[in-house]
Amino acid sequence: MSSKYKTGESTIAHFVTCTVIGWVDVFSREAYKEIVIKSLTYCQKEKGMKLYAYVIMTNHLHLIISSDSIGISDLMRDFKKYTSKQIIAAIIANNQESRKEWMLNMFRYAGSGNIANKEYQFWQHEFHPILLDTIEKQQQRLLYLHQNPVRAGIVWQPQDYKYSSAIDYYTELKEGLLEIECL
């Protein structure tokens, strides 16, 4: 499937977005966000991903990443495949999840229309890579990413959102949940 979004040289930073099927607010639960955090940590340590910025919203996430050892498309494919399996399993195992049946039905329905999935589809296929090959593009996307929780009304200041790299950019006292390389 062709798209206007194409990855460029993987050693150059890319802005990518991963969106949950149907914009389901899965990441309103901390346990599911923690799966994403652990997977990003793994990608940093084992797959050569350089993480410059991130934000995990209720139904999507934005990353600014590059890699010296694996292509951005391959990195995102592996990340999305692993996290989708882990999050679906966590939803199934969560007896306190009030939206379990509804979410699983949504993911099952999306998966039924896709021969590449056995049962569920969690992420939308595209990840909309944007090559950040200038300082202006980097700064624009960094600001956009960090302002997401502010625009959503979750926090007053970007650095107050736990699941974001804004704390690393806007404060000197604290470090965020993930190790990042500032742009």
Image: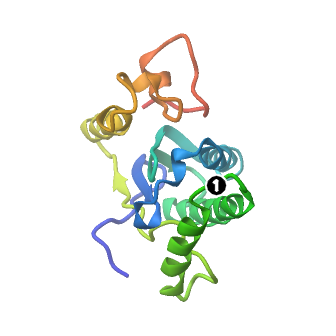
Q: Is residue 165 left or right of residue 93?
A: left
Q: In which quarter of the image is the N terminus?
A: bottom left
Residue at position x 34%, y 46% from top?
132
Choose between 127 and 151: the one closer to the eye. 151
The answer to which quarter of the image holds residue 41 is top right
Choose between 79 and 130: the one closer to the eye. 79
Residue at position x 62%, y 47% from top?
40
The answer to which quarter of the image holds residue 127 is bottom left
Q: Is residue 68 left or right of residue 166?
A: right
Residue at position x 33%, y 38% from top?
152
Q: In this view, does 149 lie above or below 125?
A: above
The residue labelled by disc 1 is 97
Q: Is residue 119 above or below residue 47?
A: below
Question: How would you rate the neighbour count of disc 1 (Cα within 10 Å): few for under 14, some for 14-19, many for 20 or more?
Answer: few
Q: Position of residue 135 (x, y in %)?
A: 29, 35
Residue at position x 33%, y 33% from top?
153
Q: What element carries label 1?
A: loop
Q: Is residue 45 left or right of residue 2?
A: right
Q: In this view, does 16 lie to the left or right of 176?
A: left
Q: In this view, does 178 lie above or below 160?
A: below
The amino acid at mark 1 is Glu
Q: Position of residue 150 (x, y in %)?
A: 33, 31
